Amino acid sequence: MKISSPASISGPPSPSGPRLHPVVGPARRLGRWVDQSWRLAALPLLLLFILPIIVLLTRASPQQLLANLQEDQIRQAILISFRTTLISLVVIVATGTPLAFLMGRYQFRFKRALDTFIDLPIILPPAVAGLALLMTFGRRSLLGSWLEDRGLQIAFTQTAVIIAQVFIAAPFFVRAAAIGFAGVDQEIIQAAQLDGGGRWQVFRFIIVPLTRLALFTGAMTSWARALGEFGATIIFAGNFPGRTQTMPTAIYLGFEIDLDMAITLSVILVLTSFFSLLVVKWLVAEEREEETEESR
């Protein structure tokens, strides 16, 4: 009696394998529908980000903007904003780099609490930040009265503008720099130390070049944030034209008195912030492409 093999019972296998065409078609259509649904769902918030900026930029013609730039109050606000933010940036980098290195490279007690205090100005209401600075450096405060007795007045001066900008914007630099410092391989540092490099030499010639993109990104982000600082500044430094009036505080005054002035300064701030972020994103993309090519 001849016994059939399992292959003869089930029949020869199809050379093309199982037919999945009836399933693949609906699956692809479902995938396209899902992709389209995600795009439609993302559209409302995307329009909210883009539409107001476009409306603001098209509100005034270039000729009107150039004419408004001839106004003394606008030019003074621009000058004060750029001067104070550049000073603030120097202070942020000089004082924030050691703090960022500490947070990025060392472990110690209460580090999480300290990290929370560093990030707190980012989410703190600007009015609260301004009031806290005024209570610390104002004439009626202990520190403020001590400084005033020695001829140093801080509140409602350009020094107050700089302090407010540093307080609000410094966390952005510290956060970015700390992430960069934490990403440096410890073996590279140890190898440099074995070659005779001191701590300062290792930091200057090894760590800083390896973290240059993080430092630059943090610096640019902090500068852009300081340029747009309003709430803490107007409470702590006031809004005195030609003395403490920055572009954001001038916009607040212009909204009530001169709308053209407010629009002109708003356009300048939008363009400055946009191109600052664009440069940062371009550099980050270039760095990633270089790392990808090196890894290949």
Image: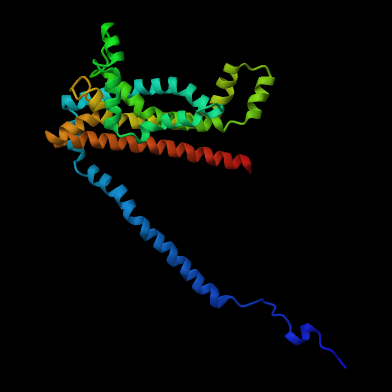
Give the residue at x 43% y 31%. Answer: 218
Which residue shows up at 19% across the image and 35% down it? 262
1 is higher (above) or lower (below) than 204: below
Q: Quadrant of the C terminus?
A: top right
Up-down relation of residue 265 to residue 84 (above or below): below
Residue 293 lies left or right of residue 279; in this view the side is: right
Does 87 appear above or below 296? above
Is residue 279 rendered to the left or right of residue 292?
A: left
Q: Nearer the viewer, residue 61 or 258?
A: 258
Q: Quadrant of residue 78?
A: top left
- Above or below — where is 248 with respect to 289? above
- In the picture as drawn, the residue positioned furthest to the bottom comes out as 1
Image coordinates for residue 40, horizontal then vertical, percent: 36, 60
- Residue farthest right in this picture: 1
Residue 233 visible from this viewpoint: yes
- Evaluate whether residue 83 shows in this view: no
> Which quadrant would residue 238 be assigned to in this image?
top left
Q: Residue at x 33, y 35 (%)?
A: 273
Q: Position of residue 19 (x, y in %)?
A: 61, 78
Q: Quadrant of the N terminus?
A: bottom right
The one nearer the camera, 290 or 261, is 261
| Location of residue 255 in the rendering, given as x and y in whole percent from the top left corner | 16, 36
Could you tell whether 209 is left or right of 33 in the image? Answer: right
Residue 157 is situated, as x and y percent measured from the top left of the image, at 24, 17
Closest to the observer: 94 or 152?
Answer: 152
